[in-house]
Image (tube, grey):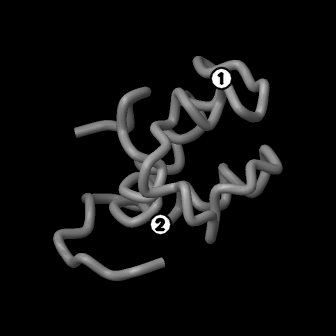
Amino acid sequence: MSVNAHDLVEEVMRRWPQTIRVFLDYRMRCVGCPIACFHTVEDACREHRLDMATVLADLRAGAAQSGRPSARRSSL
């Protein structure tokens, strides 16, 4: 499974913790944002005026570094 545009931002960060660095590097204010549980990656890219294909590629690379998605449900 890989990160896609319709995944919720909070779920991406929870499943693949290394993606948090990607959100921070793009200066996206998603980490700790109360709307992260409602916004998709596509929504966040649109809100921050970022190229979704580029951000997705970086999120996927970050997810690959995180290894397998976490089965554990922990809060960020």
Q: Residues within 10 Å of mark 1 (few under 14, many from 20)?
A: few
Q: Position of residue 66 (x, y in %)?
A: 42, 61
Instruction: Answer left or right for 56 relative to 74.
Output: right
Q: Nearer the viewer, residue 48 or 51?
A: 48
Quadrant occupied by the N terminus: top left
Which label was assigned to residue 40? none
Distance in Å between CA atoms under marks 1 and 2: 19 Å
Toward the bottom, the furthest residue is 74
Q: Residue at x 66, y 50 (%)?
A: 22
Residue under circle 1?
54
Q: Quadrant of residue 49?
A: top right
Residue drawn at (24%, 76%) of the image: 73
Picture quadrant of residue 19: bottom right
At 21% from the left edge and 78% from the top edge, which residue is drawn? 72
Mark 1 or mark 2, earlier in chain: 2
* Residue 54 screen position, x and y as percent: 65, 23
Is the Cβ of the residue at disc 1 closer than 8 Å to that at disc 2? no
Residue type at tag 1: Thr
User: How far from the left and from the top, in percent, is residue 39?
Assistant: 49, 43
- Where does the image place residue 58, in percent across and percent down from the top left? 60, 36
Q: Is residue 24 above or below residue 17?
A: above
- Asked which secondary structure carries label 1, the reply is helix
Instruction: Identify the secondary structure beneath mark 2.
Output: loop
On the rendered structure, is 23 left or right of 64? right
Q: Which residue bears the numbered disc 2?
A: 17
Q: Residues within 10 Å of mark 2 (few under 14, many from 20)?
A: some
Q: Residue at x 67, y 25 (%)?
A: 46
Identify residue type, mark 2: Pro
